[in-house]
Image: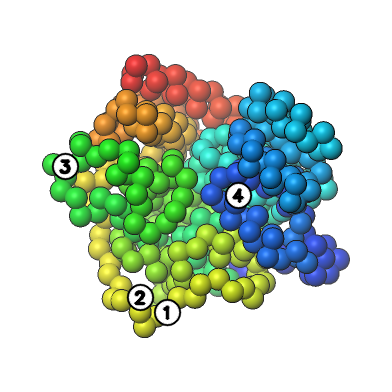
Amino acid sequence: MNGPVSFPVRHLSLHNSFLLKYLALFGSTGSIGVNTLDVVRRQPDRFGIRYLAANNSVDLLAQQIAEFRPEAVAVNNREAAALLRSKNPGCEVLDGDAGLKELASRANYDIFVGALVGFAGLASTVEAVKQGKRVALANKETLVVAGELLSALAHRSGSDILPIDSEHSAIYQCLVGEPENSIMRIILTASGGPFRLTPTESFSGITPEAALRHPKWVMGRKITIDSATLMNKGLEVIEAKWLFHQPLEKIDVVVHPQSIIHSIVEFVDGSMKAQLGMPDMRLPIQYALAAPDRIAESYDRLDLLSCGPLEFAPPDLDKFPCLRLARESGMRGGLYPCILNASNEVAVHAFLEGRIKFTDIPEKIQWATDRAPLDAAAPFGCGSDEEIAAGLERIRQSDVETRVAVSRLIG
Ligand code: MG
């Protein structure tokens, strides 16, 4: 992308850098949401909560309302919203897709935190980007399916999209102060998941319980399964393409089981920069909220003398075909990443319910991408608001069609 150099990060200043920044936190009851609220709780002079949104976890949301006193909340599930209204008569409660979208489009907040799971996060993120907000993005699916359109929208509105994903936060931190044309290669590190050393012959017997035991990170269920198939890393490759404006050929993956190095950038002169830290999501969350400032905090510190040797290995694409499928869809572009993502979400859901095998997940994705419509790779137009709206509608339709088709296939 030709345009202004993206680094260093712009300061999020209103009048002065000590002014309280208000958050619209979408996905407040999930793992990223709860960690974000802990950052806010620890930094009451810097951050406050203006809006919360969640899918349906009423009890936790009610607790969060009592503690953080948001001006309004949105709940996707209408029955859950009604229940919440009866419990919290003092708080405005919006509901459904339209409610989430409306909350994100309000003007009186500073930072949008996008932490809803899966495709559901797209519409509200689009509204926040249109508003020119700082967007701290944990929902990688949003950039995977609509990265081209969101980048174009952000360019027009002046919105800064900062990653919460730990690998991308690492890359962002490595790139601060570096000119964009100095990047030779981005190297995303992968823990390899719980089945790195499991023989391929045993893969068809992997249970949801085994796949949900991630060796390094405690996360939500969908992303934990994606980490076990390495689809998570595949989605992250596409995410990096849009965040850092780099072609996929310049984005590599290396397996690093210790998860101490969160990612690496290699520069044209052969120098490499890496970012290291404890596997604690509050670090990238806090950075995305405050960057380029760093906030002094008392989280557990990395002890280099006790973290042991650091290992690196290439990913095994035969054992983990999801990583290959993601890269292929990213290379084809257009609707392919959307089809990849929708079929993966349906397949992961079916696997968690015990309806398909672990090894069926990449098969369903392959089936969905093989039957993509002829014009699926056609690029999006990004020249006008109308073209961007048409592109988003194309994505929405493709998402629905793919989900219906893969659900039928699974039966
Ligand atoms: Mg990650």
Element class at badge 4? helix
Question: Of marks 1 and 4, which one's residue comes earlier in the chain?
Answer: 4
- Residue at 60% x, 36% y: name it: 57
Cα separation between marks 1 and 2: 6 Å
Front-most of residues 217 and 116: 217
Would you call the spot at circle 3 few (<14 residues within 10 Å), some (14-19), or many (20 or more)?
Answer: few
Counting residues from the N terminus, which is met first, the one under dot 2 or under dot 3? 3
Between marks 3 and 1, how big is the CA–CA gap? Answer: 36 Å
Q: Which residue is mark 2?
A: 307
Residue 404, position as x, y percentages in the image: 44, 19
Farthest residue, direction left: 201
Question: Is the residue under label 2 in contact with that under label 1 (CB below 8 Å)?
Answer: yes
Other-residue count near label 1 (Cα within 10 Å), few / some / many at <14 / 14–19 / ≥20: few
How far is disc 2 from disc 3 in space, using C-alphas? 30 Å
Q: Quadrant of the C terminus?
A: top left
Q: Between 257 and 167, which is closer to the camera in this rendering?
A: 257
Regarding residue 390, the answer to whether it shows in the image is no
Mark 1: amino acid: Asp
Q: Are marks 1 and 4 in contact (CB under 8 Å)?
A: no
Residue at 76 percent across and 29 percent down: it is 86
Q: Amino acid at mark 4?
A: Gly
Mark 4: few/some/many CA within 10 Å (<14, 14-19, 20+):
many
Say whether residue 33 is visible: yes
Question: According to the image, label 3 marks what residue?
Answer: 202
Q: Nearer the viewer, residue 20 or 43?
A: 43
Q: Tag 3: residue type?
A: Ser
Q: Name the spot of residue 316 as percent of width and height, x first.
A: 23, 52
Lower position in the chain sequence, tag 4 or tag 3:
4
- Which residue was labeled with disc 1? 303
Residue 33 is marked as: 4
Question: What residue type is disc 2 on?
Answer: Cys
